[in-house]
Image (tube, rainbow, N blue to C red):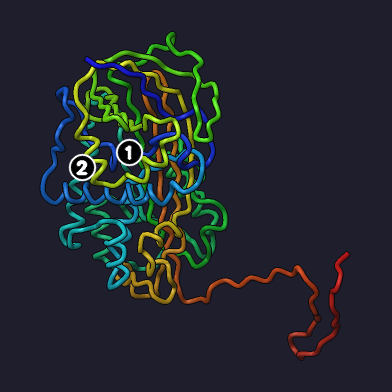
Amino acid sequence: MRSTNVFLMDNNSDRNFSTGEIMKSLIFPAMLLATLAVPALAQVRIKGDPAAVGEGNNGFAVDLYRQLDKEKGNLFFSPYSISNALAMTYAGGRGNTAKEMASAMHFDLEAARFHPAFATLIKELQGPVKGRKYQLKIANRLWGQKDYGFLPDFLKTSAQQYQAGLKEVDFIDDSEGARKAINAWVEDQTNKKIKELIKPNILSVDTRLVLSNAIYFKAAWLRPFSAKDTKPGDFTTSAGKKVKVPMMHAGMRTNYFDDGKVLGLEVPYEERELSMILLMPKKADGLADLEKELTAIQLKKWLGKLSDHQVRISLPKFKVTAEFHLNDVLKQLGMKDAFERKRANFSGMTTRERLFISHVVHKAFVDVNEAGTEAAASTAVVMDRTSLPPPGVFNADHPFLFLIRDANTGSILFMGRVADPT
């Protein structure tokens, strides 16, 4: 049997990150793949439409990674959470808005088949909870303006296919109270790992609906790393700098490949239902080239190379939190009309007012240590009404005129200018 040292990521904590150190976003179900019931990588069990939805989600995961990897640093996100939240939103899309969403998100089935298939995928991911050692929880909820009257078919699809019940809140008179309620729900669903998903000033008097997803995962390694074997070790960053990190060490029999350019490793969790997949270029400065090769097809090829080996593993402990505002990224993927006040068509949600997506926000957390992995993420899609014009901007950073006017008579009582405020 062949052996090697396999390294992943540095120990940077709580900051926004993208491509600095090594393949980072393969933690959540859209990229996770069920694993290792036998020494070879297990075949995906679901078939038909649910399998097609899973493949589409994986395609979106890779596309999104390619968009998010442009900045320096680490990167971590849950493509599944984003897909789930936008799938619920897609249920209310119509016309070109729905067409663009389907293309950008790889929602390749017609809507009548897509939503039931996504429901089956959620059920398969959740699995039977009783007696299970690991935790994987997926939760969805709609937060709607009270007494608004969303269309029954939209609410039915949300409830039946996504288990997303409607919670009425008051965005118009108490948007801050609504924000706190949504954030508290996210925090509760993610075991307090995702806090303040929705920042101040995201919600407004024009907000009518927020579609939220939360996902929480915690599992022990099938073969835990021994804490006594964790020692400081060198890690070479993408900038070529050597840093000291707490490096875990273990020898185990698991799936691995070395194709001369890329190393691949599978580290299974308890019960072998889930695993972490690591992909690393053999060259210390080769991550950018590896990312250029990354496509859904190439990822599948790399996974297909994994086979049974005895492997010596060295893996840093790390804990990271990342958050993203995804509007521009999704527009780059082709989902444009959904964000445009004049073109967005979500008439499947309501016919009272025209709605558009004002914000898609996402936050993710991961902690990898000797015992296993804890990870959480949440996504919120904020829908605002389109009846008002875009907010204006008045930045008084140069000379201006001003006046004081009586509203009843129209009389100008005072008038002047500011040429130098100092």
Is residue 41 rendered to the left or right of residue 340? left
- In the displayed structure, 10 sits above or below 32; it is above
Amino acid at circle 1: Phe
- Choose top left, top right, bottom left or bottom right for residue 407: bottom right
Mark 1 lies on residue: 28
Is residue 401 rendered to the left or right of residue 141? right
Mark 2 lies on residue: 123
- Choose top left, top right, bottom left or bottom right for residue 279: top left
Residue at the far top in the pictured view: 228
Amino acid at circle 2: Lys
Q: Residue at x 51, y 15 (%)?
A: 232
Q: Residue at x 43, y 71 (%)?
A: 340
* Pick the front one: 402 or 227: 227
- In the displayed structure, 366 sits above or below 164; it is above
Kindly report which numbered mark, 2 or 1, lies closer to the viewer in this rendering: 1
Badges 2 and 1: C-beta atoms under 8 Å apart?
Answer: no
Precedes in sequence: disc 2 or disc 1: 1
* Pick the front one: 281 or 73: 281
What percent of the width, then of the height, locates residue 418? 84, 74
Q: What element does badge 2 sit on? A: helix
What percent of the width, then of the height, locates residue 260? 29, 29
Is residue 245 rendered to the left or right of residue 227? right
Query: How far is disc 2 from disc 1 in space, using C-alphas?
Result: 16 Å
Q: Residue at x 44, y 23 (%)?
A: 316
- In the displayed structure, 202 sits above or below 124; it is below
